[in-house]
Amino acid sequence: AFGRVQVGTNALAVPADTHHEDNTHFLIYAVSTLAEQTSPAVFAIYDADATVSGIRFHGKDLDDDHLGGTIFWEPPENMLRVQSYAVYFAMDAGGSQRSQIEHEVTAGTDRLFLPLETHRHFSHFVVYTRSALVEQTTPASTPVDDEFTRVLGLRFADEDLDQGEVGGDVVWQFPDDTSEVVEYIVYMAEDAVGA
């Protein structure tokens, strides 16, 4: 027997994450002091599946060790019991060593903004759906695929012949991917790290 309840009770709580194995129906038998009835009430088990798909990341942070941008996904086909989404960083597609990004996202929203300058210390984005009862056990996932942009072949020939003064063109090669670049800013600094 999966469970028993006393007379006067008309419900049996099925804990979240209960494996139904090959069982396809709930059968409810009334029991008297003499015997269990032979013809039960029957109800087919509906095993809800509400997993997002098509997760993608549109990065806007151009540094190689930082992320920032928007994580998008396609909602599950069946949204009947989905209340929200939880989006995490993880070390693999199964969600190990996960760390939640920002806050839960209300059902009906299919994206989450990842703040710029977020350190990249993980390999996957994982998205879980949540019902009123529980967060799903197995997430949808995608590997982090983020582009970074750095100019190449930087050159400068000083054509100003006065000590303590420079003049001429700073020249560089365009990065391979300029799809997110809107301008280039050139600084003069006291050292190679920008102090």
Image (cartoon, grey):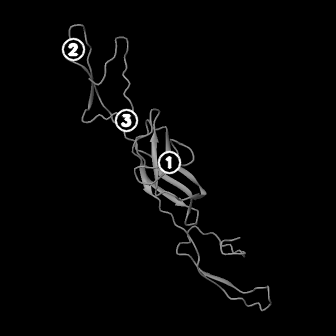
- Residue 96, above or below 6: below
Q: How many marks are shown on the rendered structure?
A: 3
Residue annotated with mark 3: 17
Q: Between residue 41 and residue 35, name the one nearer to us.
A: 35
Judging by the rendered image, the residue that carries numbered circle 1 is: 87
| Along the viewing direction, whichever of 141 and 177 lies nearer the viewer | 141
- Indicate the quadrant where residue 50 lies: top left
Question: How far across and down, in percent of the image, does residue 86 sit?
Answer: 50, 44
Nearest the eye: 179 or 157: 157
> In which quadrant is the N terminus drawn?
top left
Which comes before the other along the chain, label 3 or label 1?
Answer: 3
Q: Nearer the viewer, mark 3 or mark 2?
A: 3
Give neighbour class at mark 1: few <14, some 14-19, many 20+ (Cα, 10 Å): many
Q: Amino acid at mark 3?
A: Asp
Residue 24 appears left or right of 132:
left
- Mark 3 to mark 1: distance in Å? 20 Å
Q: Residue at x 51, y 43 (%)?
A: 108
- Identify the mark nearer the N-term, 2 or 1: 2
Three-letter code, disc 2: Gln
The amino acid sitting under disc 1 is Val
Kindly tell me whether residue 146 is visible in this rendering. yes
Q: Is residue 184 above or below residue 84?
A: below
Q: Which residue is mark 2?
A: 37
- Residues packed near mark 2 inside 10 Å, few (<14), some (14 to 19) or many (20 plus): few
